Image (cartoon, rainbow, N blue to C red):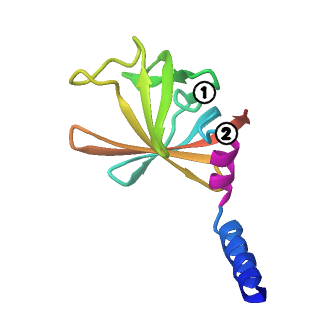
């Protein structure tokens, strides 16, 4: 009986030590993507690209009811074009999110998919994608927590 009790205690200790803060958020029902995220750094083909004044205000905001807002200003020919988009989001599984709405058009009959990694105790969000053979990586920092 003592051996079984010790085994149970050891199992519980391993179980609790194996949980990270990401797991705690998932167990609590809090999606780490919730909140407002400000663009911090971006890369093109692993080369850092400096954020200009036009891009420094770019952000994503993900709300609990499944809505999102994206502000993605673009500098072209020395003119800063303000691009604001809104739509909906849902998590398929950890790290895979589906965006939908008129501002996020379907590709090949499917809503766009965004793969996200979280770092530094969910205070950084990393989005990587390849478009036209160019690999983009954008790192956002959480500025408002839900």
Magenta stretch: give its range. Answer: 20-28
Q: Is residue 2 visible?
A: yes
Overall secondary structure of the magenta stretch? helix
Residue 25 colored in magenta in the image: yes
Q: Can residue 72 be seen in this view?
A: no
Question: Which residue is labeled 2 in the image?
Answer: 30
Q: Which residue is drawn at 71% across and 76% down?
A: 8
30 or 75: nearer the eye? 30
In what element is the residue under mark 1? strand
Q: Quadrant of residue 78?
A: top left
In what element is the residue under mark 2? loop
* Residue 9 horizontal/vertical position (percent): 75, 77
Q: Residue at x 30, y 20 (%)?
A: 106
36 or 28: nearer the eye? 28
Classed neighbour count for the residue bearing mark 2: other residues with Cα under 10 Å, few (<14), some (14–19), many (≥20)? some
* Residue 33 horizontal/vertical position (percent): 59, 38
* Extreme residue in the bottom direction: 3
Question: Which residue is labeled 1 in the image?
Answer: 61
Residue 123 colored in magenta in the image: no
In primary-sequence order, the first of circles 2 and 1 is: 2
Residue 77 as seen in the image, left or right of residue 134: right
* Vertical placement of residue 45 versus 61, above or below: below
Residue 107 as seen in the image, left or right of residue 88: left
* Residue 139 horizontal/vertical position (percent): 52, 45
Q: Which residue is drawn at 43% across and 25% down?
A: 99
Q: Distance between the residues labelled 2 and 1?
A: 15 Å
- Which image quarter holds the N terminus? bottom right
Classed neighbour count for the residue bearing mark 1: other residues with Cα under 10 Å, few (<14), some (14–19), many (≥20)? some
Q: Residue 5 carries which label?
A: none
Q: Which residue is drawn at 64% across and 26% down?
A: 64
């Amino acid at each position: 009986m003592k051996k079984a009790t010790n085994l149970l205690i050891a199992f519980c200790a391993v179980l609790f030590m194996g949980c990270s803060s990401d797991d705690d958020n998932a167990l609590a029902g809090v999606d780490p993507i919730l909140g407002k995220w400000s663009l911090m750094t971006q890369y093109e083909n692993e080369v850092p690209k400096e954020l200009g004044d036009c891009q420094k205000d770019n952000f994503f905001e993900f709300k609990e009811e499944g809505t999102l807002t994206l502000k993605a200003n673009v500098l072209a020919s020395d003119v800063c074009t303000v691009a604001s988009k809104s739509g909906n989001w849902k998590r398929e599984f950890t790290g895979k999110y589906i965006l939908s709405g008129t501002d996020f058009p379907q590709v090949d009959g499917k809503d766009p998919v965004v793969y996200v990694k979280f770092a530094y105790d969910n205070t950084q969000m990393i989005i990587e994608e390849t478009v036209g053979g160019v690999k983009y990586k954008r790192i956002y920092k959480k500025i408002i927590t839900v």
